Image (cartoon, rainbow, N blue to C red):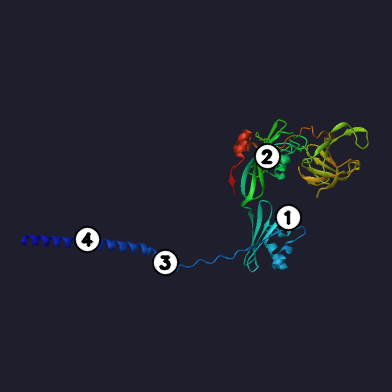
Amino acid sequence: MKKISIRVLKRKKESNRLFLIFFIFFLFLLFLFLSFIRKKEAPQEEKKEKTEISIPDPPLPPPLREDKIIVKTGVTLTDILSPYNFPPLEIHKLREEVKPIYDLAKIKAGHELRVFSDPDENVVSLEYDMDGDSYIHVQKTEGGYQAEMRKIPYEILVRMIWGAIGDNLISAVARQDETDFLALSLAEIFAWDIDFYTDLREGDIFKIIFEKRYLGEKLVGYGNILAAEFTNQGKIFQAFRYTYPDDGDTDYFDLEGNSLRKEFLKSPIKFARITSRFSLNRLHPIRKVYRPHYGVDYAARVGTPVQATADGTVTSVGWNGASGRMIRIRHKNAYETMYLHLINYAKGIRKGAKVEGGQVIGYVGSSGESTGPHLDYRIKYRGSYINPLGWRFKPVKPLREEFSEDFKKETKAYYSLLDAPLVLFSKCSSFPLYLSD
């Protein structure tokens, strides 16, 4: 009996010891848990304390109000700024301080001017669009005004289209969801080789690689045509835009480096119908006698712009009997051109004026002996009349030899695209080739 009691006692002692061990272990775990909780909460408390003692950010300035103003004909800077409480002396000061960058007295009709003012209606800054590429930014300071020229931050996407001629170039380009401007730009590039009214045939093919300009998501216009191809009556013409790295001059060349520009444009009117050609024996429509017709007649609406076909100097402007209102231009290499039956002359066209090829010099009319609105265009070479449509004019200076390798490198990718079959060209045209600022 005594032995049994001793065993029971021993078991109780062992149970108490195990309970004590488990209790101590539990306290140890509780201690670790509480320590972990404190460490986790400590950074939040510190962060909270730091947030409470941090200096708040200064409030943002209120947004400026922007007023967009399209300059109207006859409107001056004083007219525009007077409603903004600009006294005449302040406007004079503004003009004088900005003049080293641009003379604001010469703002042009049709250009946009933006006025930025604060909630108290105080003018803070001005912006004036110079052209399609840059604008003047004028900032008001404590002492006066600071001005700088800035580039318009366009996003430029390069696109590709191709099309086939049905009736004319403009409608063919329009079918590709592009505007007349792109069609006219293409016509200007090939104007020395193709008359886009008389030379086009149904089924002629064109390919264009060109830039489109965006501000945000808004299309604001076209950039440059980078490369183009025109297949006219089976003959392929190609053009690649190249800018010389040393002087910044730009021209269009074919793959061999020959300039697309020649001594004379093929036509003095971009889109017009030929009604009478050069002939040594033509029945005169009014006098009803056979006699030479030394020019080419282009039928066009009254007021259609007429362009000089080459650089030169105006030698006479005025009425010339049966020729009506006429302009004569002397060119280099013993050439002379004449433009007959005009309704009026372009601004600045007078005797002695210098003109450039492609410059508008007058407008189609029906003055003199004429049965309807048209332009009679004539050329003399060394004093004798020549056929403007049959004469072979020389090209202007080709690509400078020292830049031939750079030209090849710049145009290689464009040539590969133009040379690709239409199926591949079409696939490339569905997305932009590259993106630039």
Mark 3 and mark 4: Cα distance apart in space: 39 Å
Closer to viewer: mark 1 or mark 4: 4
Which label's residue is closer to the chain start, 2 or 3? 3
| CB under 8 Å between discs 2 and 3 | no
- Kind of residue at badge 4: Phe
| CB under 8 Å between discs 1 and 2 | no
Where disc 3 sits, the SS reads helix
Give above or below for 15 relative to 385. below
- Kind of residue at badge 1: Gly
Residue sitting nearer the eye, 286 or 146 = 286
**Residue beneath disc 3:** 48
Which label's residue is closer to the chain start, 2 or 4? 4
- Kind of residue at badge 3: Lys
Residue sitting nearer the eye, 211 or 313 = 211
Give the farthest residue toward the front: 1
Residue for point 78% across, 37% down: 333
Residue for point 44% across, 66% down: 51
**Residue beneath disc 2:** 252
Where disc 2 sits, the SS reads strand
Closer to viewer: mark 3 or mark 4: 4
Mark 1 and mark 3: Cα distance apart in space: 58 Å
Please provide percent x and percent y for residue 196.
75, 37
Mark 1 and mark 2: Cα distance apart in space: 30 Å
Closer to viewer: mark 1 or mark 2: 1
Which label's residue is closer to the chain start, 3 or 4? 4
Closer to viewer: mark 1 or mark 3: 3
